[in-house]
Amino acid sequence: MNTINKQVQSLASVETQSVSILGSTGSIGQSTLEVLSLHPQQFHLFALSANTRADLLLSQCEKWQPDYAVLRDSEQAEWLEQSLIEKGLTTQLLHGSEGLDFIASHEQVDIVMASIVGSAGLRSTLAAVNAGKKVLLANKESLVMAGALFMQAVEKSGAVLLPIDSEHNAIFQCMPTPRLNGASESSTELEVLGASLKAGGIRKILLTGSGGPFRCLPMDAFSTITPDQACAHPNWSMGRKISVDSATMMNKGLELIEACWLFNCSPSDIEIVVHPQSVIHSMVEYLDGSVLAQMGHPDMRTPIAHALAWPARVESGVESLNWTQMNGLTFEAPDNQRFPALDMARQAAEAGGSVPIALNAANEIAVEAFLNEVIPFTAIIEVVQQCLEKIPFEEPMTLDAIEAIDFQARKVAKHCCQAFQKVSS
Ligand code: NAD
Ligand code: MG
């Protein structure tokens, strides 16, 4: 047996693993619980967390009886604490960002699912990375905001970073067999991410996207798009923020930046390909012309199960593809005029520094304003553009500096949203 196989086998035979889920009440959090429920012997649920959905967090605690639960919303904390006692549950309730850091970095935790949405997930995800955990990264925004710092922390702590975003998980699966770091018999550290594409014999990464619900909608109808229409994704069922990002294709832009950090490459190494059926989740093209693709139903339980069990494989609950019923797989170039977010994100990836931070912050504010029916769909990208023009370029070196830029960009974006509101009322 060669060294790689021995390493993979030793990692695969680890006993019961303790899991914390940051954002257990969300779409990814709930899918993670579904996968975990198939493997009660293999995984122990250490902690759950929620922002405001205290009632759902309570029912998850009843079912799973984790050691800890974290609720961010302080107004409902007393009610939840009382309800846990009344139900005779021993789950200990923690609060706010300190509680999240605690469950992300606790010594008993092996795996952390980072599935809080938006910049709110940055600190706790980094806490898990700094504690050297196996980190399952759904929260792409933390890499968009703090990619350099984040990847340095991974390297320093020896954390194992596994992508959950379906495209990045697919790319990871199509990459060359995990490269051994140091390649010594005793080393258990696997260097999968971070090696250069060239060293792996890779020509380029093909990042696929469905094109979202408005791929074919006449552009003059964009101004009347409602939040519910934007959230009705043709293939994926997701939280509302990422659903709107998919509708503007900002999601693909954020994913381009995410891929640059994860796979240590530049934007020019990545081609975005629209593939409306979402059967291929992304591809890797090698120097010899071979293209490897990862396929499956558009169901997040597949990447979640892949990362939970990696380097082994376990059941996810997802059915087989029905090859003979498929109506063909099609591919097209993205329409950059219809979806200006793609060029904007590519330029932000190339500029680096404060630009992706401002892009992400402004987008979060604009999407929220759209979901609250304060601005129209077409204003989302305009707000981001206006904000990018107003935030001066900087190279932040610390987390505090990153958060200061994020704060400033949010303020500017809120002003831009208000200006839109005034014009339209
Ligand atoms: P969601 O809105 O369904 O869930 C978000 C979770 O984060 C909830 O549990 C919520 O309680 C928690 N949360 C929100 N704000 C918080 C705050 N301020 N403090 C603490 N917790 C907070 O979102 P989702 O669709 O599950 O997405 C989660 C992340 O995964 C996002 O970064 C998204 O881009 C990424 N992702 C999601 C999918 C998907 O299919 N849903 C696919 C790929 C990547
Ligand atoms: Mg994705």
Image (spheres, rainbow, N blue to C red):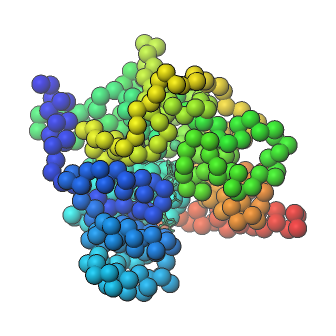
Describe residue 105's horizontal placement relative to residue 293 as left or right.
left
Q: Quadrant of residue 371?
A: bottom right
Residue 134 image position (x, y, % from top left):
29, 51
Check the image and report above or below for 82 versus 291. Answer: below
Describe residue 382's horizontal placement relative to residue 239 as left or right.
right
Residue furthest top as drawn: 288
Residue 366 image position (x, y, % from top left):
69, 59
Q: Residue at x 62, y 59 (%)?
A: 364
Describe residue 394's horizontal placement relative to residue 136 as left or right.
right
Q: Residue at x 67, y 42 (%)?
A: 213
| Between 407 and 338, the one nearer to me in the picture | 338
Q: Residue at x 51, y 73 (%)?
A: 52
- Tally of numbered discs: 0
| Between 128 and 154, the one nearer to me in the picture | 128
| Between 85 and 383, the one nearer to me in the picture | 85
Classify the position of the N terminus by image quarter: top left
Check the image and report above or below for 419 versus 165. Answer: below
Residue 422 image position (x, y, % from top left):
85, 68
Check the image and report above or below for 412 versus 253. Answer: below
| Between 169 and 215, the one nearer to me in the picture | 215
**Is residue 98 something that shows in the picture?**
no
Describe residue 193's horizontal placement relative to residue 295 as left or right.
left
Residue 92 image position (x, y, % from top left):
30, 78
Check the image and report above or below for 242 versus 67. Answer: above
**Is residue 333 something that shows in the picture?**
yes
Q: Residue at x 11, y 38 (%)?
A: 186
Classify the position of the C terminus by image quarter: bottom right
